Amino acid sequence: MSYQDEYNYSMNEPEAFWKDKAGDLEWFKQPETILSQDEHGIHHWFADGEMNTSYMALDYHVNNGRADQLALIYDSPVTATKKTYTYRQLRDEVALCAGMLKNFGVVKADRVILYMPMIPETVIAMLACARLGAIHSVVFGGFSSRELAIRIDDATPKVVLSASCGIEISTEINYKALLDSAIEMAAHKPQSCIIFQRPQKHVEMVAGRDFDWCDSLKKASPADCVAVKGSDLLYILYTSGTTGKPKGVVRENGGHAVAMKYSMKAIYNTEPGDVYWAASDVGWVVGHSYIVYAPLLQGCTTILYEGKPVMTPDPGAFWRVISEYKVKALFTAPTAFRAIKKEDPDGEYIKKYDLSSLSTIFAAGERLDPPTYEWLTEKLQRPVIDHWWQTETGWAIASNLRGIEPMPVKAGSATVPVPGFNIQILDENGKQLPVNRQGNIAIKLPMPPSCLTNIWGDLARLKSSYFEAYPGYYVSGDGGYIDDDGYLFVMGRVDDVINIAGHRLSTGEMEEVVGKHNAVAECAVVGRNDELKGQLPVGFVVLKSGVEIDDEILINELVQMIRTDIGPVACFKEAYVVKRLPKTRSGKILRKTMRHIMNGEEYAMPSTIDDPASLQDIEQLANKP
Ligand code: COA
Ligand code: AMP
């Protein structure tokens, strides 16, 4: 089938289309209701199907000829460790871990938070939660105690799983200490914490609350898969919104499994038995979807890599992994390639490895900038595919459909809508814009399987964040346009979310933290383009009148506050004291204009500006060498 036929089928007969795709998985009871709407008008896929995601990802393959095939390869240059698991071994470990969680009282629909490094136990625990029908919520290790506490209070987990440490190149991150202070800060107290003691670091346990992972496993017996409904939740994953409170994006089991399985062939062109590598972190949606669930649902071998693209030990790290495990498809964020390119501009390390297994490279998390695209294509001589997606969807909204009909690549474009996604470009009033006109990227409802059906415990926020701006559409928060050939160009966020090294962070949240400093009257944080990380935050602060503080001391304190309150991953390192912030006459800070100035982009003087001279300070700072 051509791409156009497949796409038209998904648009004209969505229920028939997705029923077909659902048939590629083994359900306990096939869904009869394919698409439904609840009393709040929210769409759900496969609501009455009975299934278990962990069963589909593991037991199914063990029972159908893949028991001895590798399911998971763990490669950790930071600890000099490698370990493999066949499908049978992984299924058995997952069943035992599920038995351990059961001993701690975890049952269907309970929440379990994971604050863990990139070790096999993390993947095993996610699948173990799924096995019990419990809802996991993985918190990225680069977030601070306060961020973890916010998530603990919001998800109210029965159990928290963590490890003694994470390793960032050669620095040990004491996850247990971060967890302890998070629990102290949180109003909700989990019943138990199960801690995996890594050989690199041994931590003290809190008596009565903390339990040793390995000892607890010894007391467990394997647990069976619990049947859940297609619309029961598999996980909550928090993502940055425009305010200080992250949004708990919820994912339903049925739609997620179907979309994941479909994408592995349609987008990534992989077959069961192929080796697939998403060089990301399980704390992000890419890690959930393409380190853990999708490759296993497809019967592939997935790689869990605990390292960086550079410095572990050199810019050949990715090429080493690809050649060692015969990776067919690599998926990572453009920033990783920029880091490699910076250290190895001539691609000398690429030449050292046999990359004959590698057929395609996929990039997402931020726009694949044309220079990085050109460099990769030239050095690797393979298709390099940019594809656009979000935590909210769990999979690509626009891509080059490599397993349906590979299309010519246009640098800077995420190519065409993935079947199921009706992408429209709308103006501020919700009117469809013609081709080549930039506007808000929206998706006409209903969205295909896997997309969010709620923000955990906050239906009102779901509606106000995504569905109220343009009735009948989901608003993505990204801006862009579609060209004459139907190719989508995603140009960046239209809200206060920025993308730092492929990580999504909220400038609004940073402003809330900076605004807490005693000396600060008001502040603005905007994203500045960065050659390596895509964007970096820059803060502007106005002091309270009468306050005297050395600029350098203040800025160091602000940097420290962001590290403590949000985490090092926010990369907040640059801030300036200014006399006033540019504002409209009604008092709204002109962040967009500030962003244009900081990035050396053309901008029109806003007609509503209160004091045009306020832009001069920003211009001076932007031009500072
Ligand atoms: N646990 C604890 N801390 C973490 C962490 C984790 N899992 N991940 C990052 N951090 C910390 C880092 O140690 C660093 O701290 P520092 O300021 O004390 O040095 C800070 O957060 C920023 O990290 P990062 O943005 O990763 O910068 P870096 O300079 O260490 O590395 C890259 C730069 C480009 C190599 C790195 O960002 C990278 O590999 N990016 C790939 C992006 C990716 O996988 N995105 C996922 C979506 S697809
Ligand atoms: P996250 O939810 O963390 O995956 O971040 C999603 C956001 O990252 C999107 O809303 C975009 O702003 C950005 N993004 C992801 N992939 C791309 C891409 N291929 N091109 C442009 N922006 C992207």
Image (spheres, rainbow, N blue to C red):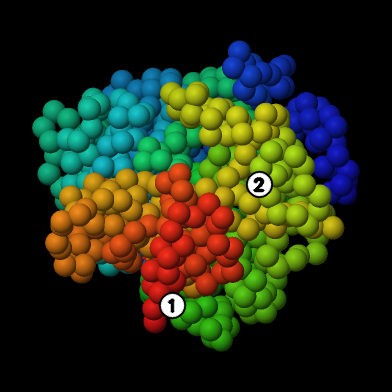
Q: Say the numbered circle drawn on residue 623.
A: 1
Q: Say the numbered circle drawn on residue 440.
A: 2
Task: Judge from the rendering whether residue 557 lies leftward or rightward of residue 383; answer left or right.
Answer: left
Could you tell me if residue 331 is visible in this image? no
Q: Secondary structure at mark 2?
A: strand
Residue depicted at 43% across the width and 20% down the height: 108
When the figure is inspected, residue 466 is found, relative to residue 495, above or below; the finding is above
Q: Quadrant of residue 394?
A: top right
Q: Secondary structure at mark 1?
A: loop
Q: Position of residue 206 (x, y in %)?
A: 12, 36
The amino acid on which the numbered mark 1 sits, given as a three-letter code, is Asn
Which of the two labelled residues, at mark 1 and mark 2, occupies the earlier sequence position? Answer: 2
CB atoms of marks 1 and 2 within 8 Å: no
Circle 1 or circle 2, nearest the eye: 1
355 and 147: which one is in front? Answer: 147
Residue depicted at 36% across the width and 41% down the height: 244
232 and 598: which one is in front? Answer: 598
Residue depicted at 26% across the width and 60% down the height: 559
Q: Quadrant of residue 330?
A: bottom right
Q: CA distance from mark 1 to mark 2?
A: 30 Å
Task: Judge from the rendering whether residue 398 lies leftward or rightward of residue 309; answer left or right.
Answer: right
The amino acid on which the numbered mark 2 sits, given as a three-letter code, is Asn
Q: Position of residue 496 (x, y in %)?
A: 47, 49
